[in-house]
Image (cartoon, rainbow, N blue to C red):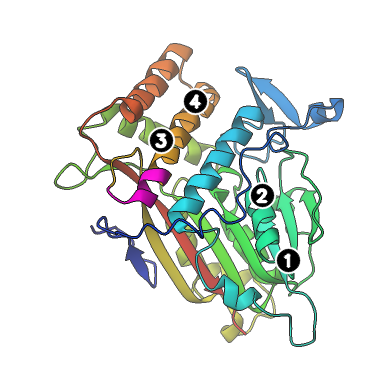
Amino acid sequence: MDVDEHDSPVYLVDDFQEEDSDMDSVHTHTTGFTEHTMSTLTSDAALEYFQEVNGRMFPLDENLPFLFPADNAEVHRLEIQHEAVKILLKGNYYGPVREVLGDLDPDGRRKRVLDLITGEGSWVREMAAEFPHVDFTSVDNTPLVPHSRCTNILGYEVYDLYNGIAEEDNTFDVVHVRHAMTKIRDLPGLILEIHRVLKPGGLLLYGEFQNNGWDASTEDHSAEETTPCLIHALRIARDIFSKQGAYAFAWRDVPPLLQPESVIWDSVKGLDKHQRGFTSIRLESKVAPTGTWHSNPRLRESGWLMQQLWVRTWMSLRPMFIKGGLCESETDELVGGAIRELIIPSSRKLYGKYTVLYAFKPM
């Protein structure tokens, strides 16, 4: 299966016939859908951050795209998303993370990881458990849950990322960011900031869903005819994303920005030619089945979760569609049609794609 991606230096696509079934590493240090992680901010202070729109709570910050809510239901959606992605990737990361974090610095200092757009916090908690000799810092631009303290998680911080990352230059060995398209209106600015706070030779980890759907039961894998409501809803969602200033095609937009030839590096004063951009950029498109149709046990399990995830995603996007100009009846028809095509049993073999990327800051 070919994927249209001209700008990536390395591009791989999962084989639909993959036969591995190793689930042991996937469930190591699983956070689970705990009572703690289902507790969102409920104090009076939370009113300073949120507003109610069409029955869901949203951040008041006008600098954030109006896309996904910030409430109990959204926390649960993010927990499902985390588990689905972890099973899909066979763990919490793609790339040489163990090699980078395996030992202390030569001077004996503990290594440091920055987790951006933390969300419900599953990733950073599980990574802190897997790498107890590494210190983690968690940053988001919206308060969502009261996080439990952990010895090697130095802090859960919430501030305006559009004003930059509040860390010193050359601080982190790894920076992890995923699903940024829903929270960021300035990807070039974010990439420049990530580059700044990474140590020379530091590792960037990035992950994003591609905002489209496919059907493996058709000859060309097009889902246009087999799921017309879903494809129509995706088009409208992408259009609203773009109008909100979000990056509907972030998975496609990010790789070219990392290249040393990108014009974004012209804005950084004092940056030598060999220090521009990122090196050893590796990108992979993971096939993410929706539903339990796949023959591989691991992909069946992730597919079951993906199906739940997409149903909840469409429900969460209802206020966005209304704010984007659709009336309530149009929105209900749009969302209901997409959900029906996702859950009604049929011969369809629906899937999405999840892009993972890693790259290094030049030494």
Q: CA distance from mark 2 to mark 3?
A: 23 Å
> Which numbered mark, 3 or 1, is in the foreground of this view?
1
Callout 1 amino acid: Pro
Check contact, mark 2 vs mark 3: CB within 8 A. Answer: no
Q: CA distance from mark 4 to mark 2?
A: 22 Å
For mark 2, does the 10 Å Cα neighbourhood hold few (<14), some (14 to 19), or many (20 or more) residues?
Answer: many
Callout 2 amino acid: Thr
What residue does disc 3 label?
Answer: 307
Callout 3 amino acid: Gln
What residue does disc 2 label?
Answer: 118
For mark 3, does the 10 Å Cα neighbourhood hold few (<14), some (14 to 19), or many (20 or more) residues?
Answer: many
Mark identifier at residue 315 = 4
Q: CA distance from mark 3 to mark 1?
A: 33 Å
Range of residues picked out in magenta:
295-301
Callout 4 amino acid: Met
* Label 3 or label 1, whichever comes before in sequence order: 1
Mark identifier at residue 132 = 1
> Which numbered mark, 4 or 3, is in the foreground of this view?
3
For mark 1, does the 10 Å Cα neighbourhood hold few (<14), some (14 to 19), or many (20 or more) residues?
Answer: some
> Which numbered mark, 1 or 4, is in the foreground of this view?
1
Side (left or right) of 259 relative to 156: left
Q: Is residue 312 above or below residue 353?
A: above
